[in-house]
């Protein structure tokens, strides 16, 4: 089924010369599995290209505009700009999910992390499509306007630090306490365990996180703790 992509182009403020590039960037592989006669391939090759274009443009921008910043710091800043959470948020801003070609099963899947992964990949594929359709300069303008523009907020709120580091720094500054993490629950078989972990300030349970690894659960707990404490 063909979708009208002109509202999406309006949001993107881009007019594609070849609409098949834009359309293919929105095709998840599950849709092809369910609709093998669809005229276009899925978006994974475009995602591969878009990822490289995005990294190049962001790296060049940081290199030119922050000449005194060490490589390690720029690496953290770049990671904050191009990680899946950021890209999925940008995809949501453009209401990209509405235009995706997904299988019936994927549409029904309510797992937020799976949706985030699909959106982030589609956004990278979109950048790849834009690069193929209109070249590097247009892709660069799009990336700087929509992604690099988020850098000021990232630097102001130290979002380039992982949530555990941010929460630890804030807790030590605000309450002179170092957070501790405790496993509250382990569920499931060894090959697919789910961990529930609490983050504490002394005896106060501040927040709880879940994940498929202890590290993932700790990160989620720290992120929730930052929202609870509202220090930032």
Image (spheres, rainbow, N blue to C red):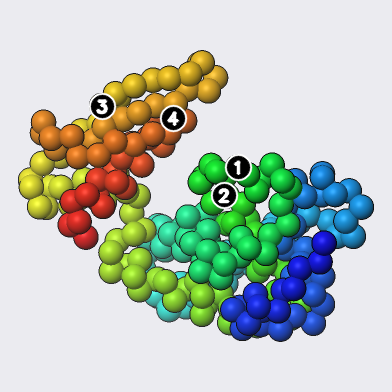
Residue drawn at x 59%, y 79% as measured from the top left: 11
Q: Counting residues from the N terminus, which is met first, the one under dot 4 or under dot 2?
A: 2
C-alpha separation, residue under disc 2 versus residue under disc 3? 29 Å
The single residue placed furthest to the top in the displayed view is: 189
Give the answer, above or below, for where 10 lies relative to 72.
Answer: below
Determine which residue is flagged by label 1. Answer: 109
Percent x, y for residue 93? Answer: 51, 69
Please identify, in this view, whether the residue under mark 4 or under mark 2 is nearer the observer: 2
- Quadrant hosting residue 100: bottom right
Q: Residues within 10 Å of mark 2 (few under 14, many from 20)?
A: some
Residue drawn at x 65%, y 69% as measured from the top left: 127
Please identify, in this view, whether the residue under mark 1 or under mark 4 is nearer the observer: 1
Residue drawn at x 65%, y 48% as measured from the top left: 107
Q: Are marks 1 and 2 in contact (CB under 8 Å)?
A: yes
C-alpha separation, residue under disc 1 versus residue under disc 3? 30 Å
Determine which residue is flagged by label 3. Answer: 182
Please identify, in this view, whether the residue under mark 2 or under mark 3 is nearer the observer: 2
């Amino acid at each position: 089924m063909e979708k009208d992509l002109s509202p999406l182009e309006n949001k993107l403020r881009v007019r594609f010369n070849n609409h098949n590039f834009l359309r293919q960037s929105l095709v998840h592989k599950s849709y092809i599995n369910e609709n093998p006669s669809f005229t276009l391939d899925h978006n994974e090759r475009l995602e591969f290209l878009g990822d490289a274009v995005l990294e190049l443009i962001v790296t060049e921008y940081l290199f030119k505009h922050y000449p005194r910043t060490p490589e390690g710091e720029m690496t953290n800043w770049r990671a904050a700009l191009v990680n899946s959470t950021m890209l999925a948020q940008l995809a949501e801003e453009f209401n990209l999910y509405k235009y995706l070609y997904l299988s019936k099963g994927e549409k029904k899947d309510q797992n937020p992390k799976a949706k985030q992964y699909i959106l982030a990949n589609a956004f990278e594929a979109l950048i790849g499509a834009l690069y193929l359709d209109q070249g590097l300069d247009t892709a660069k303008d799009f990336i700087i306007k929509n992604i690099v523009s988020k850098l000021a907020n990232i630097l102001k709120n130290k979002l380039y630090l992982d949530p555990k580091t941010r929460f630890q720094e804030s807790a030590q500054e605000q309450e002179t306490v170092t957070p501790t993490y405790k496993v509250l629950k382990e569920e499931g078989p060894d090959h697919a365990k789910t961990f529930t972990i609490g983050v504490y300030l002394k005896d106060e349970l501040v927040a709880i996180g879940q994940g498929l690894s202890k590290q993932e659960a700790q990160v989620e707990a720290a992120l929730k703790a930052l929202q609870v404490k509202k220090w930032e």
